Image (spheres, helix red, strand yellow):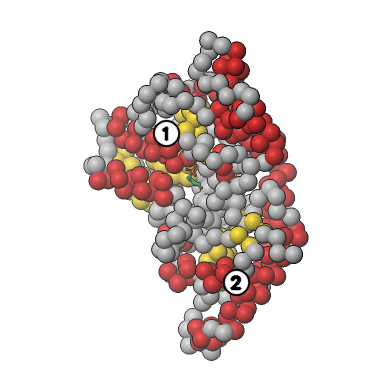
Amino acid sequence: MNRLIYLDYNATTPIDTRVLEAMMPFLSTNFANASSLTHRPGRAAAAAVDLARQQIAELLEAAPQEIVFTSGATEAINTVLKGVYERYQDKGKHFVTCATEHKAVLDTFAYLEKKGAQVTYLPVDQHGAVDLFQLERAIRPDTVMVVLMWANNETGVLHPVDKIAEITHRHNTLFFCDATQALGKVRCSVSSNKIDMLCMSSHKLYGPKGIGALYVRRKNRRIQIAPLIHGGGQENGMRAGTLNVPAIVGFGMAAEIARRELAEESSRLAQLRERLEMSIINLPATFVNGQLGPRMPNVSNITFRHTKASEIMIAVPDIALASGSACVSGTRDPSHVLLAMGLSAEDAHSSIRFSLGRFNNADEIDRCIAQVAGAVTRLRTNSPVWQLYQSGAIE
Ligand SMILES: *Cc1c(COP(=O)(O)O)cnc(C)c1O
């Protein structure tokens, strides 16, 4: 009866069996190097990489030549931020980003600031939204690039990327979008907007870990990025190193499945999420973060006031949940995303991220509701802080 209920899909997803099947031949019989075009297995590996590139391009409505494989989104982010900083010094050293970005963006900018970059961190409102007028005012003549994510990993809040792309182009600055979470959950097209660069990660999309990609627009604008990794000249000199063929094949298949099943999967997940929130929200002093604006269908970030998230999670050992994001948990700092949305440190420490995915069903959600509601109620009954809250002594 105590089978694990996995509700941490934003940290990582299991590999879809269809993805694993596509990868298997390249882990065993065909192990050739995709650059070895002098023999048949090498050419077969190259063809498999070409197909994957096309599958990923189709998901984005981009051209295959615009896709560069990396080891993941973190590497793609490092490549763009450091590579653009190096190549565009003539234009300036100023960047605009946001307080709620992923740590891969914030930590790379912190590093570049030590090297002389100037970075403006836009705030968000209580719903996690950026103010587009504020964005426009932050862009200066020496602003090289604006970096804003498509969807937030902790709250699911979506940024209006089409409008952001429009603004950045009007001011002649580059726009780089971290679409790692959005991909496969909402439609992510680069054909209908002016996004210049975008990063993604296979393991957030039911593909294997250790593979990701960068989209770099080829049409209309020539974008220069100094490579992070030098060597054999693979990926048009943008990212050297022998291609990880099985992982690339898996990523391609994952993208293909995401494209075919996105609409159906999104509405199914939205229903499950609704089921979860409608029940959980009946607990007193409990609220959903980022609920009012546009949001991804699979995430619910919930604050249980005066109740520690860490204690709730210990009390429901058969449910895999997260507070903050996987990348920063392990530290005891409250979520920088929730703090930026105006939550107190105490409320941030009382917040749990439920992230749903492909293999969840309604029965699991019902068991989750029962277990979490039971745990929260029990913890509160024994809590002096909760008694103070109930007596009206604290808010
Ligand atoms: C997971 C994640 C990353 C990092 O991706 P990796 O491929 O694991 O390096 C970056 N940005 C966001 C929004 C993420 O959710």
Above or below, 181 relative to 386: above
Q: CA distance from mark 2 to mark 1?
A: 50 Å
Give the side of residue 210 with respect to residue 373, left or right.
left
Among numbered discs 2 and 1, the one appearing first in the sequence: 1
* x and y, in percent, of residue 344 in the image: 43, 69
Of residues 95 and 13, the one nearer the viewer is 13
Mark 2 crowd level (few <14, some 14–19, many ≥20, 10 Å Cα): some
Q: Is residue 198 visible?
A: no
Q: Which mark is residue 377?
A: none
The residue most toward the front is 29
* x and y, in percent, of residue 112 in the image: 29, 43
Amino acid, disc 1: His
The quarter of the image holding the N terminus is bottom right
Residue at 39%, 39% (x, y): give it: 78
Residue at 67%, 41% (x, y): give it: 16
Above or below, 331 relative to 63: below
**Displayed quadrant of residue 146:** top left
* x and y, in percent, of residue 389 in the image: 52, 84
Please state which of the two labelled residues, at mark 2 or mark 1, is closer to the viewer. 2
Residue at 60%, 13% (x, y): give it: 40
The residue most toward the top is 38
Above or below, 308 relative to 113: below
Q: Which mark is residue 315?
A: 2
Amino acid, disc 2: Ala
Determine which residue is flagged by label 1: 169
**Displayed quadrant of residue 231:** top left
**Displayed quadrant of residue 257:** top right
Mark 2: which secondary structure?
Answer: helix
* x and y, in percent, of residue 75 in the image: 43, 38
How many numbered badges does the structure rendering display?
2
Mark 1: which secondary structure?
Answer: helix
Residue at 62%, 68% (x, y): give it: 316
